[in-house]
Image: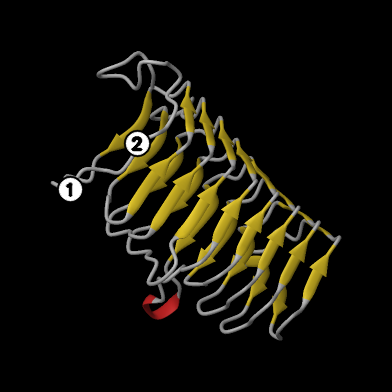
């Protein structure tokens, strides 16, 4: 394991197949400005883990594959996760979760321009993860052919904007869902192309408040299934 315990450290250009039971690269609590660039990380429990109250990490241009979890954000804020290839991880490709002692705020984190495929879930947001200030942005990613759902938003989650993604052909081994939602509180889904999933967006929140999922393309000019011919 590479433990980043100082600010402004860069880990770049390594091939890591350590079979570690923890995160192969771990940004420790409270650390600022870590850069994790151009690594090939495979066959571990977690490839990259961002710990509670770490801020401003950049995870960019890595190959993250054949782990249990790919990249985890555990109560860490204002991070950039971009232009990574995240594939064939047994559980979540990119996972948002609460860190130790209930640190659940992921405010200001941007997940952009990643190719996410062949994982169980492409992007998974665990229960109770929130944004206390700037919304978490999941934007302009290609999230295709994951085993269960492309994106899953679990219960009591708030403050996520899902925009401009291509979300296609997910769920070959499971529920065939593009985006599966169990919470609608400050969840916005706009400008995505959602095609080739049996369920484009599946809302099982049970909330009376409608899910904000307008201005998406569903694979048909007349809109999503129900009213139209799309997902």
| Vertical position of residue 39 compared to residue 188: above or below | below
Q: Residue at x 25, y 19 (%)?
A: 226
The C terminus lies in quadrant: top left
Q: Secondary structure at mark 1?
A: loop
Front position in the image: 135 or 14:
135
Q: Look at the image and tell me whether residue 107 can be seen.
A: yes
| Vertical position of residue 21 compared to residue 225: above or below | below
Q: Secondary structure at mark 2?
A: loop
Q: Residue beneath label 1, please?
A: 209
Q: Tag 2 or tag 1, which sits nearer the N-term? A: 1
Horizontal placement of 37 versus 208: left or right? right
Q: Residue at x 47, y 60 (%)?
A: 136
Within the image, what quadrant is residue 81 found in?
Answer: bottom right
| Vertical position of residue 141 compared to residue 174: above or below | below
Q: Residues within 10 Å of mark 2 (few under 14, many from 20)?
A: few
Q: Residue at x 41, y 76 (%)?
A: 103
Front position in the image: 120 or 191:
191
Q: Look at the image and tell me whether residue 1 can be seen.
A: no
Q: Residue beneath label 2, please?
A: 214
Q: Residue furthest top?
A: 229
Q: Residues within 10 Å of mark 1 (few under 14, many from 20)?
A: few
Q: Residue at x 50, y 77 (%)?
A: 52
Within the image, what quadrant is residue 111 found in?
Answer: bottom right
């Amino acid at each position: 394991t590479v433990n980043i315990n100082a600010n402004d450290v860069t880990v770049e250009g390594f091939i890591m197949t350590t079979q570690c039971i923890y995160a192969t690269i771990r940004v420790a609590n409270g650390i600022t400005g870590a850069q994790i660039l151009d690594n090939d990380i495979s066959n571990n429990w977690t490839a990259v883990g961002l710990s509670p109250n770490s801020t401003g990490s950049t995870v960019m241009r890595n190959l993250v594959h054949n782990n249990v979890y790919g990249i985890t954000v555990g109560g860490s804020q204002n991070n950039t996760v971009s232009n990574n290839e995240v594939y064939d991880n047994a559980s979540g490709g990119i996972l948002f979760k609460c860190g130790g002692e209930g640190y659940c705020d992921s405010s200001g984190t941007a997940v952009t321009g990643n190719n996410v495929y062949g994982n169980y879930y492409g992007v998974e947001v665990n229960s109770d993860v929130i944004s206390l200030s700037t919304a978490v942005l999941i934007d302009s990613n290609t999230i295709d052919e994951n085993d269960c759902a492309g994106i899953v938003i679990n219960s009591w989650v708030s403050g996520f904007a899902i925009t401009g993604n291509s979300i296609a052909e997910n769920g070959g081994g499971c529920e065939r869902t593009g985006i599966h939602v169990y919470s609608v509180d400050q969840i916005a889904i706009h400008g995505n192309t959602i095609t080739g999933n049996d369920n484009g967006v599946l809302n099982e929140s049970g909330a009376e408040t409608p899910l904000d999922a307008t201005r998406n393309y569903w694979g048909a000019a007349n809109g999503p299934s129900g009213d139209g011919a799309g997902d």
